[in-house]
Amino acid sequence: MCRWLAYQGSPIYLDQLVYEPEHSLVHQSLEARKAITRVNADGFGLGWYTERDTPGQFHEVLPAWGDENLRSLTHHIRSHRFMAHIRSSTGTQVARSNCHPFILDNWMFLHNGQIGDFNKVKYTLERALPERLYVQKRGTTDSELIFLLMIKNGLRQNPIEAIRHTIAEIEAVIDEKHAGELPFKASMCISDGEQFWLVRYSTDGHPPTVFSKSHGHDIILASEPLDSCPTWQVVKPQTITHVHSTHLVSYDIHASPAVAQAH
């Protein structure tokens, strides 16, 4: 399983989270604590927002712990909102095109998890994409395909319902193809440059972990805590969480649109 983090708040240098904490993302590339796969060495990626209309990105296939370009970039890039991801492949090739976060226009997406038995459902799910989105696909991962399906299902207009629709669509194809032997697992983070949406979901009820920590107007979201601070809060499983500033509102994946819980 992969590891990731996301941040929004006062502008900071990326290395303040990617390198400096006692259990930083780079440390997790060597020794993840809350994942089945302890080493995440199949590439990494950064995505960051500035005053530009679209975010910047950097992808590489080397292990994060040994890349001097990553160290230099994170030391010099300052951003009020960014994502970082270290990859542990679940079967697709190690390539820049398969590294997260994935970006389309102002939207950014990253994912930890997998669609179980992906090869059984890949063709059907790819055919569900309209041509205008299919031609945007650069890699071979289930993660990028999930992102494009969300765009197809109205992510730009209504993110909560687009996420729900996409999860239901994937589950329907899994059932149709009798491909449910392995679960569909997902911790996901999505941004339009102004806010975040978190997803923590699994068909077996045991999704990958996601934690949050707030300080003033700053918030960190991560697959696992970056330090031993007791203020990290676990994100509720089987939910979509809308993060605007430091205000978090959770929605059950299968509930009606009116059901929400602030925390």
Image (cartoon, grey):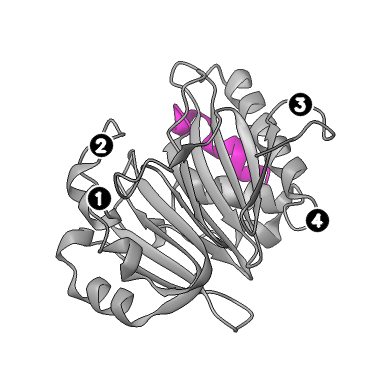
For the residues labelled 3 and 2, the Cα–Cα distance comes to 32 Å
Q: Could you tell me which residue is drawn at 49 percent across and 28 percent down?
A: 120
What amino acid type should be assigned to the residue bearing mark 4?
Gln
Q: Amino acid at mark 3?
A: Ala
Q: Position of residue 197 (x, y in %)?
A: 62, 49
- Local SS, label 2: loop
Q: Are marks 1 and 2 in contact (CB under 8 Å)?
A: yes
Q: CA distance from mark 2 to mark 4?
A: 37 Å
**Residue 141 placed where, x, y %?**
44, 47
Three-letter residue code for mark 1: His
The N terminus is located in which quarter?
top left
Instruction: Tell me the SS state at disc 4.
Output: loop
The earlier-in-sequence mark between 1 and 2 is 1
Sequence order check, earlier mark of 4 and 3 = 4
Q: Which residue is mark 2?
A: 33
- Which callout, 4 or 3, points to the residue nearer the camera? 3
Observer-nearest of 200 and 17? 17
Q: Residues within 10 Å of mark 3 (few under 14, many from 20)?
A: few
**Helix or strand or loop: what does disc 1 sit on?**
loop
How would you rate the neighbour count of disc 4 (Cα within 10 Å): few for under 14, some for 14-19, many for 20 or more? few
Q: Which residues are magenta?
A: 115-129
